Image (cartoon, rainbow, N blue to C red):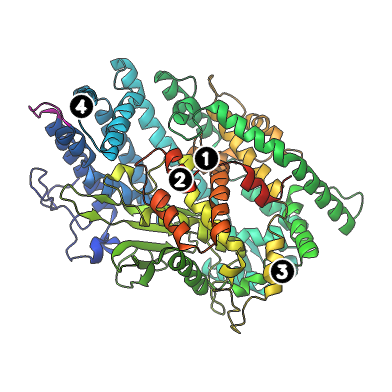
Amino acid sequence: MNEGKHDININDEKLHINTLIYPPVEMPFDAIPFNLINEEDIEEAVLCGIKQEDKEIQEIVENDASPTFQNTLLPLEYSGKLLNKAVNVMGIYLANATTDTLENLAQKLYPLISEHNNNISFNYALFKRIETVKHNNENLSCEEQRLLDITYDEFIRRGVNLPEEKQKRLREISSELSKTVLQYSKNILDDTNSYLLTIKNRNKLEGLNAHHLEAAAQTAKEKGTNGWAFTMNAPSFQPLLMLCKNRTLRKNVWYAYNRLGMKDGKFDNRPLVEKIVNLRMEKAQILGFDCFADYVLTKRMAGSKERVNQFLDLLIEKYKPQAIKESKELKAFIQKKTSKNFNPKPWDASYYAHILKVSKHKVDTEKLRVYFEIDRVIEGVFGLAKKLYGIRFKLNKDIPTIHKDVKVYEVYDEDNSFLALLYADFYPRKEKKSGAWTYSIKEQYTTEEGKNIRPHVGITMNFSKPTKKKPALLTLGEVTTFLHEFGHALHEIFSNTRFLSQSGTNVYWDFVELPSQFMENYALEKDFLKTFAVHYKTGKPLPEKVIERIIQSRNFRVASACMRQLSFGLLDMGYYTLAQKLEGDIISFEKKAWAKAVLGRQSRKICMSTNFQHIMSGGYAAGYYSYKWAEVLDADAYSLFQQTGIFNKETAKRFRDNILSKGATQDPNILYNNFRGQAPTINALLRRDGIN
């Protein structure tokens, strides 16, 4: 850090550091000045933030007064604001607008951040003060007591009572994990960006419609070539798998995607998978657990690996018979379309499943794009939030963003009070990770002076881009993805807690997907679709008979989709229930781990683990089952809306007041019961999916 460049003094009340912390101009809503931030600003802010939090912790420990909630837990909760902000901004850039310089900087800084966090976790003097408060039996509010209990438990879970040599090894593991996980993600991004399929002969692309051809031609032009170009971004390559008649082309693209991160060379994630799994296992065992899943699941709704495995097995039992029927139906259809001797391969599945769906339900998802122009979809989704909760969104073009594609909206409550800023980023680009996610830019909490700091939240997707001739036209699946991420955003937007660590989506991982998956239900609601689904050229609404066919087709191959999700959950649990070191062939391990949920033959030429960011570099290690767990919750919750009316404001208020605004202020089981009036059951999910 070049301390000569700026006036840095951590003893000052204010830190005059750089544009990241104190922008030269006053920002609307105290927004982050993304247009002014560079890598040097981030590095400087992180290093200074570490120093500042060290000082804050030291002041707590050296306080001569007897430990109380007021002089110990509160200052600890409010410590580290500068560091948290800097780390948050760095993470946002790494995911949405990364550079080689930033990737190298992250490799340098994350071990330092990890070491700093360990210094706090292993600060025995700080822990003893917390322990004293724990035993003091002060008259605390529910939120205060929960903060105390969770903080105390976390210090123990992180190893504060362990001998020094074990703490030393935990420090080493944390540092190694931070670097390895970062490299894992970088390999996938680099491997994704290294792929470019260029087609010069139009005949090879038979089956693709004008929309996809235009997008591919634009990609080719952007890449400095002629013809039609395809990347490993989903909106680019997935139409090839679903629509292209050229089987050889489908095969090549299918292998390219399913071999991300596993090709020999510098992008090979196979050794990193082994390293990540073993480091997490070792960490858990040092902390007194048999495996990493045991460590993680003590802080989840499921509670134990036994209950997770029972849950996955129950769903396999319920869905597998239907999935087998669906598989036989598709194979018979393929052979009817080809010949009885035709042997279908995985790269045939999406192609023929699409034809079967059109044949069976008269629904062609690609032809529906013309009814889902992105601006109208945005209006529809925002309108849904207004109808349910009374909130409104106002576009603000003056707030700086990390890229010109990002739109910022001010969010206001029914009483016109300011709720949040929402950043929406819809399209893929080279420096952006694939997939869809929601991220916090600034979290909600209440200051010591009683001021309610409102959140800034971002939603990121990788939708089909607009072209020179057409606006961005989405698939119904992309509309559903939008609703999903918007549900996460509402969880942040409505947060109304006292403590930052309990706000928004800072909840158990098997609870965090409830608000997002709940919103997906509306994608197949006639009365919602009618509010925005009109032809982008003619303005004519999506025909009622088409909407009916869409709804009727909702369960097309639903069991097969469920089994795919369950296979991912089994793989996750396979890795993180290991009590012995993972060694050797991870491909063989993968095939065995999820075998009971996989219906067809498995190829050794592909590997999911090398591109499974959720459980390797994301937050879902020993927690991928959470999607299906939350699906049980969302189906059960939505069944109440179906009873009272899908736009019923009283039911929506109950959902907001008991789920969306509460964060982690109470156990999620209690929060859900407060909303629903009963514990969730699997019945609503089975009914929705048509499973007998």
Tell me the SS state at disc 3.
loop
Task: Specify the label residue 201 is tagged with.
Answer: 3
* Residue 497 located left or right of residue 189: left
* Residue 25 located left or right of residue 231: left
Q: Amino acid at mark 4?
A: Val
Q: Quadrant of residue 203?
A: bottom right
Whether residue 193 appears in this view of the structure is no
Task: Specify the label residue 512 is tagged with.
Answer: 2
For the point 33% across and 43% down, the residue is 502
Q: Residues within 10 Å of mark 4 (few under 14, many from 20)?
A: many
Q: Quadrant of residue 83?
A: top left
Identify the mark nearer the N-term, 2 or 1.
2
Work out how far the residue at label 3 is from the one at label 2, CA to CA, in angstroms.
47 Å
Identify the mark nearer the N-term, 3 or 1.
3
> Residue 358's spot in the image, x, y percent?
76, 64
Tell me the SS state at disc 2.
helix
For the point 23% across and 50% down, the residue is 446
Q: Identify the magenta region.
A: 61-68
Tell me the SS state at disc 1.
loop
Residue identified by numbered label 1? 679
